[in-house]
């Protein structure tokens, strides 16, 4: 029986784990990987203490920090959470764990385009992580589908490796941070294509082209890679207990000076899987700390009654 189980190991989960370890809590973390969406970030310029650092480098620093503590990490995927009397059961494919409280910090997962060819060519030129896969496409032509910061970030990273980068958005113009838009607009390798929808990704064994439609006319662009950057959705398929908003984000609130509570007493949540509007690395880390401290306050209240 754990006092706390942390589901997820992105910035929110890792920050929470450090605080839980310092509290000498009986807890564990469950996650298939460490880093979450931060691993997809190429350049991070707004994390306090680092003027410029890549997402993977930042996570490496986080890992170094948590290795200083004896944190129990289970490399598994949570399939379901249940409540039985006053105990929560966290189910994984091979084993189930019991705990007094749960902290959900499972982040988000990439949103799919759902066009012909995407599913079959996933991992064969279709990718959702420029940071992970950019070097594979050195010297090749690629397309980035998306119209905001994530797409801009991917395009600017890919231009360092690729011969040509098509940045395709269905919107009338690219949205996002002005500095990123300016860099992309000035790049000789990046071609911005607006008001265009993606209709199909073609290829036999690997990606060979992408079909787009602009003003009712279809056009085929010869590319060997398609990077899909159209946002993400909360990774909370396992959670059928807590209340969500229309975007399927876990709704959190503070009550009686206890932060990050969900609709289910004893379940707390933090980071990008929640309805906190600012989806930033530093915000997620702070929210993770708030949530784990809230969980400990809640546990103390159960013991003492006040």
Image: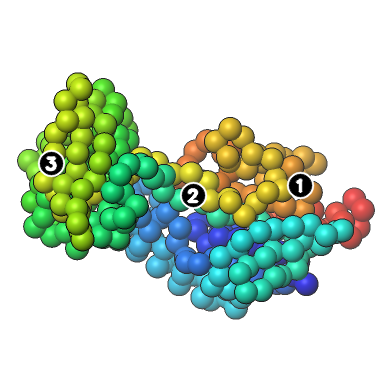
Query: Residue 204: x and y, percent?
Result: 19, 57
- Foreground mark, 1 or 3, reads 3
**Tag 2 near tag 1, CB within 8 Å:** no
**Tag 3 near tag 2, CB within 8 Å:** no
Give left or right: position of 235 versus 52.
Answer: right
Nearest to N terminus: mark 1 or mark 3: 3
Nearest to N terminus: mark 2 or mark 1: 2
**Tag shown at residue 221:** 3
Q: Quadrant of residue 38?
A: bottom left
Q: Camera-side residue: 87 or 46?
A: 87
Q: Residue at x 56, y 65 (%)?
A: 77
**Tag shown at residue 108:** 2
Give left or right: position of 142 versus 61.
Answer: left
Measured in 3D between alpha carbons, the distance from the residue under mark 3 to the one under mark 2, in whole angstroms, is: 30 Å
Q: Residue at x 70, y 70 (%)?
A: 96
Q: Quadrant of residue 6?
A: bottom right
Q: Camera-side residue: 45 or 74?
A: 74
Please, what secondary structure does the residue beneath circle 3 have? strand
Determine whether 109 is above or below 170 in the image: below
Query: Residue 254: x and y, percent?
Result: 72, 40
Determine whether 159 is above or below 124 in the image: above
Please, what secondary structure does the residue beneath circle 1 have? loop
**Tag 1 near tag 3, CB within 8 Å:** no
**Tag shown at residue 264:** 1
Query: Residue 217: x and y, percent?
Result: 16, 25
């Amino acid at each position: 029986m754990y006092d706390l189980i942390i589901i997820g190991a992105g910035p929110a989960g890792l920050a929470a784990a450090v605080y839980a370890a310092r509290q000498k809590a009986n807890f564990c973390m469950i996650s298939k990987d460490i880093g979450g969406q931060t691993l997809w970030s190429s350049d991070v310029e707004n994390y306090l203490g680092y003027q410029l650092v890549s997402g993977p480098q930042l996570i490496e620093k986080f890992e170094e920090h948590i290795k200083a503590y004896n944190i129990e990490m289970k490399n598994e995927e949570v399939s379901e959470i249940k409540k039985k009397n006053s105990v929560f059961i966290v189910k994984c494919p091979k084993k189930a764990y019991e705990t007094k409280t749960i902290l959900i910090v499972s982040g988000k997962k990439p949103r799919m385009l759902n066009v012909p060819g995407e599913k079959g060519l996933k991992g064969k030129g279709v990718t959702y992580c420029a940071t992970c896969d950019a070097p594979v496409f050195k010297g090749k032509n690629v397309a980035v589908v998306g119209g905001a910061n994530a797409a801009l970030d991917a395009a600017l990273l890919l231009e360092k490796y690729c011969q040509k980068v098509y940045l395709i958005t269905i919107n009338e113009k690219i949205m996002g941070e002005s500095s990123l838009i300016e860099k992309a607009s000035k790049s000789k390798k990046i071609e911005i294509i607006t008001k265009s929808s993606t209709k199909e990704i073609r290829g036999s064994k690997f990606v060979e082209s992408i079909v787009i439609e602009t003003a009712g006319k279809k056009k085929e662009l010869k590319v060997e890679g398609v990077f899909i950057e159209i946002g993400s959705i909360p990774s909370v398929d396992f959670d059928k207990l807590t209340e969500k908003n229309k975007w399927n984000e876990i709704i959190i609130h503070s009550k009686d000076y206890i932060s990050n509570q969900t609709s289910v007493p004893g379940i707390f949540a933090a980071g990008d899987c929640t309805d906190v509007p600012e989806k930033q690395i530093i915000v997620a880390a702070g929210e993770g700390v708030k949530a784990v401290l809230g969980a400990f306050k809640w546990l103390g209240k159960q013991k003492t009654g006040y």
